[in-house]
Each structure stands twice: as C-alpha cells, then as structure tokens.
Amino acid sequence: MLGLWRKIHRTGRVAEPAPPPPGGDRSPAAAALGGSVQVRHVDAGSCNGCEVEIGSAFGPVYDAERYGARLVASPRHADALLVTGPVTRNMTEPLRRTYDAVPGPKLVVAVGDCARNCGAFAGAYGVTGAVSDVLPVDVEITGCPPRPEAIVEGLRKLTGR
Ligand code: SF4
C-alpha cells in the first residue's frame, strides 16, 4: 500500500492541461444536456483505428470524462451515439435500431473520415454509406484516425465544458 502511495506521489497528474472551452453555439439538443453527455459507441464497420483513439480520449492522459463525457454500455442509458467507420450493409439496420433505442433528445457524433464520407472504404461493395446517409449527424470529427484531442474537442461541443 505504501509502495502504491509513493508511486502515485512520484507520478503526479498525467492528464494534459485543459485547453480553452470550445467556441460557437451549441445545438438546442446539446444545450439540453446540461453539461454532461452519456455516450454509446457503435462500430459500424471501422478498421479499429478510430477505436484505439477513442480509448485514448477516455484514458488518463486526455481524460474526456473531466469535460462531462462518459461511455455507457447501453443505448438506453445514452444521450449520444459515437459512430465509427463507414456504415456497412450488415451494420445498417443494427445502427438504426441502436439509434431508435436512445431516448430523446439524442445526438450523433460521426468519428473519423470513414464515418463522415466513407474515407478509404468509399465505393466498397459492403458499404451502405456514411453515417449521415443513415442517421442525422450533429457533430463530425475529422481525421484517419482522428487524434484523441479532436475526439475530446468534439465531445466538448456537446457538453459545452
Ligand atoms: S477513419 Fe481511418 S482509422 Fe478510422 S475507421 Fe476509417 S480507416 Fe480506420
């Protein structure tokens, strides 16, 4: 126990310093969240590169939770969907059903270039389209994969913190 305490004391805080709050007006749905957002992640056909960066965004260094964003296990507990990848044919209906399970007002964040415009998978036979072809998208996060800072910034647009 003493060894653990010493290690914590030696290491100190590892989180990046908080950048200034995001500018711009928030959508009425985001404003209704009251400063926190419960997020359900859906992989609609990603290569998993975006998932690695989402893991970093919620890890101790980038620490998205300090801005009020939290990952939850069920869409029924979520305010927003965090969707990665192009929407594949097999995931089109599950994605729609997951969206239907989220209580309103609900938001959708398209994470990564594949989610925004199919990216490297554009025109592939198994792809239905971008996330916006299936669901209304509120926030888009660019990059392949997007950096954790960009994911945190996108989530801060929802919480306003
Ligand atoms: S945006 Fe890049 S990292 Fe993310 S799913 Fe597409 S190819 Fe993979």
Image (tube, rainbow, N blue to C red):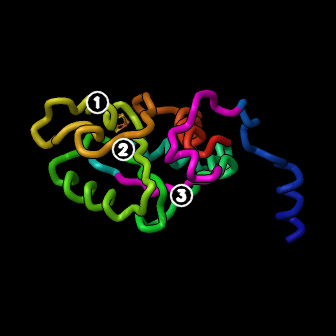
Residue 124, quarter of the rendered image: top left
Q: Is the CB of the residue bearing disc 2 within 8 angstroms of ligand 1?
A: yes
Disc 3/disc 1 C-alpha distance (Å): 25 Å
- Residue indicated by mark 1: 117
**Residue 58, how many percent across, how many down?**
58, 50
Residue at 29% across, 49% down: 44
Q: Is residue 54 above or below residue 96?
A: above
- In this view of the protein, can residue 148 be seen by the observer? no
| Mark 3 or 1: the one toward you | 3
- Residue indicated by mark 2: 84
Residue kind at label 3, given as amino acid type: Gln
For ligand 1, the image quadrant comes to top left
Contact? badges 3 and 2 (CB < 8 Å): no
Q: Is the CB of the residue bearing disc 1 within 8 angstroms of ligand 1?
A: no
**Screen quadrant of the C terminus:** top right
Q: Which residues are magenta?
A: 21-42
Disc 1/disc 2 C-alpha distance (Å): 11 Å
- In this view of the protein, can residue 130 be seen by the observer? yes
Residue at 24% across, 44% down: 134
Give residue 38's mark: 3
**Residue 29, how many percent across, how many down?**
49, 47
Residue kind at label 1, given as amino acid type: Asn
Residue kind at label 2, given as amino acid type: Thr
> What SS does tag 1 mark?
helix
Residue at 72% across, 30% down: 20
